[in-house]
Image: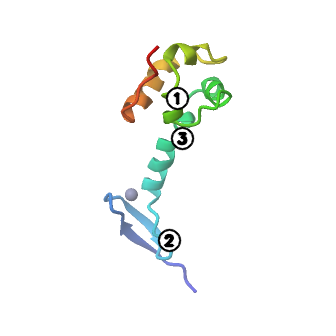
Amino acid sequence: MENKKVSKFCVNGHQFYKSSICPVCPICENNRLSKDDFLSNLSAPARRALESNGIKTIAILAQFSEKEVLKFHGMGKSTIPKLKQFLADQNLEFKIE
Ligand SMILES: [Zn+2]
């Protein structure tokens, strides 16, 4: 049986090519993953610093204050603005001390 790829448009208007049995849009899928996995957008030391403190999502990050996060081993000052941006994207912010 030929597994023919056809051009499709997803609900968000992305054009993609997939066999008809698989309706998942690769662009949306990618966006979803990168949104959930904010850690992958950080430098390796910063990522490890967060992970070793159990911070795997933006929501968990928001339970910490900026000061607390800065104390994490491997966390650099330059990462804080990035983290603030990730928080802001989700309408969150660092815990106020
Ligand atoms: Zn899409």
Q: What label does residue 92 carry, if any?
A: none
Counting other residues with Cα less than 10 Å from the Cα at mark 3, is it few (<14), some (14-19), or many (20 or more)? some
The answer to whether the residue labelled 2 contacts the one labelled 3, judged by CB atoms less than 8 Å apart, is no
Q: Nearer the viewer, residue 78 or 15?
A: 78
Q: Position of residue 39 (x, y in %)?
A: 56, 34
Mark 3 and mark 1: Cα distance apart in space: 12 Å
Mark pair 1, 2: CA separation: 35 Å
Name which of mark 3 and mark 1 comes first in the sequence.
3
> Which tag, 1 or 2, sits closer to the chain's start?
2
Which one is earlier in the sequence, the residue at label 2 or at label 3? Answer: 2
Q: Residue at x 50, y 71 (%)?
A: 22
Q: Nearer the viewer, residue 59 or 30?
A: 59
Query: Is residue 84 toward the left or the right of residue 68 in the image?
Result: left
Disc 2/disc 3 C-alpha distance (Å): 23 Å
Label 1: how many Cα within 10 Å (few below 14, some 14–19, many 20+):
many
Identify the secondary structure beneath mark 2: loop
Of the residues shown, which amino acid type is indicated by label 1?
Answer: Leu
**Foreground of the two, 43 or 52:** 52
Amino acid on which the number 2 mark rests in the picture: Cys
Q: Which residue is mark 1?
A: 61
For disc 2, the marked residue is 22
Secondary structure, mark 1, is: helix
Q: What residue does disc 3 label?
A: 37
